[in-house]
Image: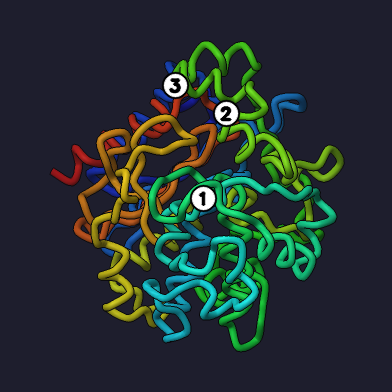
């Protein structure tokens, strides 16, 4: 029995893309994949659409064509698309100060923070000082008051620290201020991006989605994380006063998007890490951004801004949370030495556990990989790397 048959892999690849199917199958036979999906659009055409494995490890239920999964920080790319759309509509200037759109933001050392700095994780707002729980997150007005009162950890623009969870909340309030209808980021995404493009992706998962469509996450043990994460990052994740612990683990922490009864939290927006959807939808969205954005009426100036190189903080690209170099721009990750992907103008976002989506305008590629078995290598997951390597060989 082949690896593809053993994992019950389904879907299709266009002629010439068989190597991606082989890599997807090998993820199950060699890299301990549980359930996953991969999709690639090239020049607007869907050339890879694969899914397989197990949706629920306990029940053994299979991963279906319409199975959705939480993609953690890969959500950041979809959230950043909402601000790119606002930029194209003339509502937002990336070089303007945040307080121009959100006057209450101009306090406690935040007066000069620009939109670009905020979206590049250079604002020093990677963790909340005030208590923030699910109740606060669900009340956008209350959350806005908390954010307006926060104090940067250092002078904005001087250093970089991954705003693992907070970024999406700041983006959401900024969008509420500039949208003439004052919609939440999740609602704006649904109305202006997901619905027009026919996407199965939610930044605010509704009650109407049944549990049977959702893949349950298989998380690594604490020991596995400690042994396989980079050592400095591993130690930081268990130290309550570390930057990454405060940014990702607590107050409110990434776990806020989970729900014991409903798999994932419903009607709750965590735009930096709580998105739920299919690889097909993520790849489709990035494909539109990679091929001119006609479907969303994106302006050329917006797409040029997204493909431009990342602008470092005064101290460079070293990330005070991730303990290494990372490159961010306008809400997206950009290719760099520690996270190579696509051509230099590419932009996207990886998620904890291995999910990844990006646009490569030079190659006219929209790519996505999602999984329910949380990997323990950061920022590159060998399953995703195998798929992208196979895709690159085809491109060349």
| Label 1 residue SS | loop
Where's residue 46, x and y in %? Answer: 36, 57
Task: Characterize the local packing of mark 2: few (<14), some (14-19) or many (20 or more) Cα atoms within 10 angstroms.
Answer: many
Which quadrant holds residue 217? top right
On screen, residue 70 versus residue 348, left or right, reads right
Q: Residue at x 51, y 19 (%)?
A: 32
Q: Earlier in the sequence, mark 1 or mark 2?
A: 1
Tell me where residue 203 appears, x and y as whole percent. Answer: 64, 59
> Where does label 3 land, which residue?
3
Question: In the visual, does 278 lie left or right of 1?
Answer: right
Observer-side mark, 3 or 2, equals: 2
**Secondary structure of the residue carrying numbered label 3:** helix
- The residue under label 1 is 124
Point out residue 124 in the picture as x, y percentages from the top left corner.
51, 50
- Label for residue 374? 2
Alpha carbon distance from label 3 to label 2: 20 Å
Q: Is residue 31 left or right of residue 151?
A: left
Q: In the figure, is residue 16 to the left or right of 48?
A: left
Give the number of marks.
3
Label 3 or label 1, whichever comes before in sequence order: 3
Please give the label number shown on residue 28.
Answer: none
- Give the Cα distance between marks 3 and 1: 46 Å
Mark closest to the chain's N terminus, 3 or 2: 3
For the residues labelled 1 and 2, the Cα–Cα distance comes to 28 Å
Q: Is residue 67 visible?
A: no
In the image, what residue occupies the spot 29% across and 54% down? Answer: 310
> Looking at the picture, how far across and down is residue 321, in whole percent?
49, 35
SS at circle 2 = loop
In the figure, 199 relative to 72: above or below?
below
| Observer-nearest of 154 and 285 | 154
């Amino acid at each position: 029995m082949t690896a593809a048959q053993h994992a019950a892999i389904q879907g299709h690849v266009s002629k010439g893309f068989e190597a991606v199917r082989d890599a997807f199958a090998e993820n199950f036979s060699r890299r301990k994949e549980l359930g996953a999906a991969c999709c690639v659009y090239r020049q607007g055409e869907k050339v890879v659409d694969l899914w397989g494995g197990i949706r629920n490890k306990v029940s053994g239920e299979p991963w279906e064509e319409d199975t959705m999964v939480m993609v953690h920080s890969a959500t950041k790319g979809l959230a950043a698309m909402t601000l790119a759309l606002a930029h194209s509509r003339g509502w937002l200037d990336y070089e303007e100060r945040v307080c121009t759109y959100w006057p209450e933001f101009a306090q406690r050392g935040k007066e000069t923070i620009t939109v670009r700095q905020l979206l590049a994780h250079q604002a020093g707002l990677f963790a909340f000082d005030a208590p923030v729980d699910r109740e606060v997150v669900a009340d956008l007005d209350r959350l806005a008051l908390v954010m307006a009162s926060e104090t940067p950890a250092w002078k904005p623009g001087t250093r970089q620290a991954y705003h693992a969870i907070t970024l999406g909340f700041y983006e959401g309030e900024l969008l509420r201020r500039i949208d003439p209808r004052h919609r939440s980021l999740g609602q704006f995404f649904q109305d202006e991006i997901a619905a027009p493009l026919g996407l199965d992706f939610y930044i605010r998962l509704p009650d109407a989605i049944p549990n049977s469509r959702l893949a349950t996450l298989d998380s690594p043990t604490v020991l596995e994380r400690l042994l396989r994460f980079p050592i400095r990052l591993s130690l930081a994740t268990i130290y309550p006063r570390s930057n990454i612990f405060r940014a990702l683990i607590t107050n409110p922490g990434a776990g806020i998007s989970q729900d014991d009864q409903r798999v994932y939290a419903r009607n709750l927006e965590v735009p930096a890490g709580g998105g739920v959807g299919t690889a097909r939808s993520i790849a489709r969205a990035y494909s539109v951004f990679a091929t001119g954005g006609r479907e969303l009426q994106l302006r050329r100036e917006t797409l040029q801004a997204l493909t431009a190189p990342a602008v470092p903080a005064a101290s460079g690209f070293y990330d005070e949370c991730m303990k290494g170099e990372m490159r961010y721009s306008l809400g997206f990750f950009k290719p760099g030495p520690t996270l190579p992907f696509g051509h230099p103008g590419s932009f996207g976002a990886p998620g904890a556990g291995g999910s990844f989506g990006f646009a490569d305008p030079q190659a006219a590629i929209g790519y996505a990989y999602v999984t329910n078995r949380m990997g323990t290598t950061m920022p590159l997951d060998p399953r995703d790397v195998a798929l992208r390597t196979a895709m690159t060989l085809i491109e060349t």
